[in-house]
């Protein structure tokens, strides 16, 4: 699915484009696209490193969202169908 169509399907108002939720959504979209890329190019190690960096950034944003807005965090992980964070 093209980026713009996927973003339009997610209900974010234009004034909230830089919000934590929209950033997590865009990072999740990039993870999905890279996952499809790795099905064809298994040994693309430079892209693997990029994926790890994206996942780390998404994890940090999810941790921040969990600390500040628990209801928004739960709603977002349910809507994006991603796993919740592990507790330490």
Image (tube, rainbow, N blue to C red):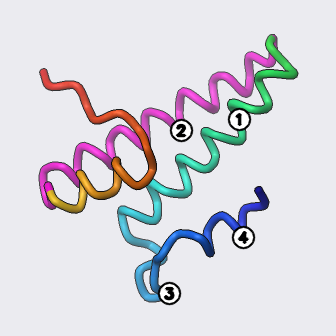
Secondary structure beneath disc 2?
Answer: helix
Q: Which residues are magenta?
A: 43-70
Task: Name the magenta segment's main secondary structure.
Answer: helix
Sequence-wise first label, 1 or 2: 1
Sequence-wise first label, 3 or 1: 3
Sequence-wise first label, 3 or 2: 3
Q: CA distance from mark 3 to mark 2?
A: 23 Å
Circle 1 sits on which residue?
Answer: 34
Where is the C terminus found, in terms of image quarters? top left
Secondary structure beneath disc 1?
Answer: helix
Q: CA distance from mark 1 to mark 2?
A: 10 Å
Circle 4 sits on which residue?
Answer: 4
Q: CA distance from mark 4 to mark 2?
A: 19 Å
Badge 2: residue crowd in 10 Å (few <14, some 14–19, many ≥20): some
Secondary structure beneath disc 4?
Answer: helix
| Residues marked 1 and 2 touching at CB (< 8 Å) | yes
Viewer-nearest residue: 74 or 87: 74
Q: Which image quadrant for residue 36?
A: top right
Sequence-wise first label, 4 or 2: 4
User: Depth-wise, is mark 4 or mark 2 nearer the camera?
Assistant: 4
| Residues marked 3 and 4 touching at CB (< 8 Å) | no
User: Depth-wise, is mark 1 or mark 2 nearer the camera?
Assistant: 1
Sequence-wise first label, 4 or 1: 4
Residue drawn at the location 24% of the way across and 43% of the way down: 63
Residue 37: percent from left, percent from top? 79, 31
Q: Which image quadrant for residue 47?
A: top right
Q: CA distance from mark 4 to mark 1?
A: 17 Å
Residue 56: percent from left, percent from top? 43, 33
Is 52 included in the stretch rendered in magenta?
yes
Circle 2 sits on which residue?
Answer: 54
Extreme residue toward the right, this view? 40
Badge 3: residue crowd in 10 Å (few <14, some 14–19, many ≥20): few
């Amino acid at each position: 699915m093209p980026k713009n169509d996927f973003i339009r399907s997610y209900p974010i108002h234009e004034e909230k484009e830089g919000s934590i939720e929209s950033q997590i959504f865009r990072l999740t979209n990039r993870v999905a696209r890279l996952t499809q890329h790795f099905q064809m190019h298994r040994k693309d190690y430079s892209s693997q490193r990029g994926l790890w960096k994206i996942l780390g950034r998404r994890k940090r944003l999810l941790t921040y969202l969990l600390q500040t807005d628990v209801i928004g965090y739960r709603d977002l992980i349910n809507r994006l169908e991603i796993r919740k964070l592990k507790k330490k």
